[in-house]
Image (tube, rainbow, N blue to C red):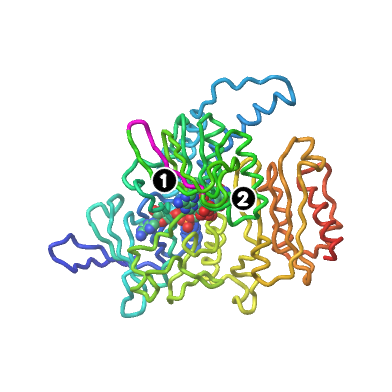
Amino acid sequence: MSTSPTADDPTRPQPLHRTVDVVVLGMGSGGEHVAHKLLDAGLEVAGVEAGLVGGECPFWGCTPSKLLIRSADALAEARRAGHLAGDVDVRRPDLGPAAARVREANHDWDDEAHAGPLLGKGLDLVRGHGRLEGRDADGAVRVRVTTTGGGSDSDTDTVLLTARRGVVLNTGTEPAVPPVEGLAGTPYWTNRDAVALTAAPDSVVVLGGGPIGAELTQVLARFGSRTTLVETEPRLLGPEEPEAGDLLADVLRTEGVDVRTGTTLTRVAHGDGGFTCTLVADHGGDEDGDEDGGEATVTADHLLVATGRRPLLDDLGLETVGLDPAAATVPVDPRCRSAAEGVWAVGDITGEGAFTSVALYQGALVVQDLLGTATGGPDTHPEEWGDYRAVARATFTDPEVGAVGLTEAQAREAGIDVVTAIADVGRDSRGWIHGAHGLIKVVADREAGVLVGATAVSPAGGEVIGLFTTAVHARVPVATLSRMHLAYPTFHRTARVVLAKLGEAGV
Ligand SMILES: Cc1cc2nc3c(=O)[nH]c(=O)nc-3n(C[C@H](O)[C@H](O)[C@H](O)COP(=O)(O)OP(=O)(O)OC[C@H]3O[C@@H](n4cnc5c(N)ncnc54)[C@H](O)[C@@H]3O)c2cc1C
Ligand SMILES: NC(=O)c1ccc[n+]([C@@H]2O[C@H](COP(=O)([O-])OP(=O)(O)OC[C@H]3O[C@@H](n4cnc5c(N)ncnc54)[C@H](O)[C@@H]3O)[C@@H](O)[C@H]2O)c1
């Protein structure tokens, strides 16, 4: 690694100037993967991180939320035992054990378990806010880091990194907080507060019925919080199949959640007694229908805002390398190259799916591109490069909502000659035995004779969707799928019902 101190302003501490092969700017799941693989291959790599190495997923996202969900599911299963195995009295639901597991998993929000192995491989970890700073005379991209101290940079407030081969952007997202009157300045929670809870609050209003809102609503309700879920759109999990969101809303209502879809939070007041939320039902209202178009007031101890995420692209210096600083995402090609030479992007900022699985998938593409390990380029070997037809995802509510590829609406919008089929998981053998609520819906392309999308709302729906992910990804003909052995009795076996329906419809 070459080191050359430079000074733009003699009154400021000397910035350190280092040249490496690749700078990874933002060390979320995708960036961490890229750094590991490039270091393994012998490249000189610098990683720039303003927060914790590993990003949102292990510390405030996937892992802690799934740990809380696991405990909440255990409670729900215990409560179900009454119908199946005699009385089980859940007397004192306690978030404590789940909170302890969260802290065990993320070492009390300490990133040593992520940073340590990378440092061991020789990563130049620069802790601080990174910003692109144009190119040097050879065209190499530069990154200036305003350091937050630590490691070898504790004596300087600025480090300038030059990347011989390129920069990989992986700066992720932050909560998008809506401009609701009175909300700013109140102690509302985001996912970061929710996953750090050690006890369930008496009452909470959850704003936003996407994956974060839906998952955390069910957790808190199962631990005994009086929970109101407010969603502006007519249904939960908006981008997924409408049948999935409707079924989930029904399940949450059965569990005692006050689900208010088609409802907008218009005003927030916070005082000693907690939050007072003014709600306006504007899309048909809640299920009772008695407040449609009218104003209602809900009070709660806490307000959890889960209304989407905003890519962290501000103050990233995108314009210094010719990228649009006002764009909502950094669009990438199948190699994850941005429009700027020598600048790749991975993860949520690419807009290809805000999932850890996508960030890791894209990280592998960048590594393949930088190391030249693919057989050919995207033009000759498209199967080796970025393909987002079959993005699989799961919302870990109970039942889980697994999905892959296109929804019916998206397929129709894409001009596909769509045939759909739907089946009730609860009426099939395993579902009935289990007492499950669920459905499987498939979306087929009649002309091609293949599935382009599927949704599995089911116990273990995130696992059930694997079958359909293979089908959509590998374009397995529906006729071939219909002849598969499917173990009996399983949740995924409901596939045969939808496939038979597609057959009857001529697919
Ligand atoms: C509550 C919750 C639950 C989730 N559950 C799941 C799930 O079950 N499954 C799933 O697939 N996905 C889930 N997700 C989504 C998942 O967390 C993200 O898709 C994943 O973290 C990928 O993000 P990323 O790599 O793009 O960036 P991030 O993880 O956001 O990391 C980006 C990093 O860049 C750093 N950074 C940003 N700007 C700068 C800068 N200028 N300089 C230096 N550093 C910077 C940040 O500090 C951060 O550490 C969940 C998200 C949340 C919030
Ligand atoms: N299991 C998983 O894979 C998982 C879990 C959590 C999050 N994630 C990822 O994180 C992303 C962000 O999750 P999210 O749930 O915050 O975002 P989201 O954008 O998916 O959902 C936000 C919801 O809030 C609603 N909303 C927006 N403004 C509102 C307002 N003012 N009042 C009421 N409702 C409002 C939207 O209509 C939407 O339904 C997801 O898109 C997903 O990719 C994944």
Mark drawn on residue 394: 2
Give the residue at x 40% y 52%: 177
Residue 85 seen in the figure: yes
Give the residue at x 40% y 64%: 23
Residue 32 seen in the figure: no
Q: Amino acid at mark 1?
A: Asp
Q: Earlier in the sequence, mark 2 or mark 1?
A: 1
Question: Residue 236, image x and y in percent?
Answer: 58, 49
Mark 1, residue position? 111
Question: Residue 239, image x and y in percent?
Answer: 59, 57
Question: Residue 65, image x and y in percent?
Answer: 52, 42
Circle 2: is it few (<14), some (14-19), or many (20+) Cα within 10 Å? Answer: many
Question: Residue 220, image x and y in percent?
Answer: 52, 35
Query: Any magenta on residue 277?
Result: yes
Residue 268 position (above or below residue 20): above
The quarter of the rendered structure image containing the C terminus is: bottom right
* Of 234 and 213, the residue lying toward us: 234
Q: Is the stretch drawn in magenta largely helix, strand or loop?
A: strand
Query: Any magenta on residue 317?
Result: no
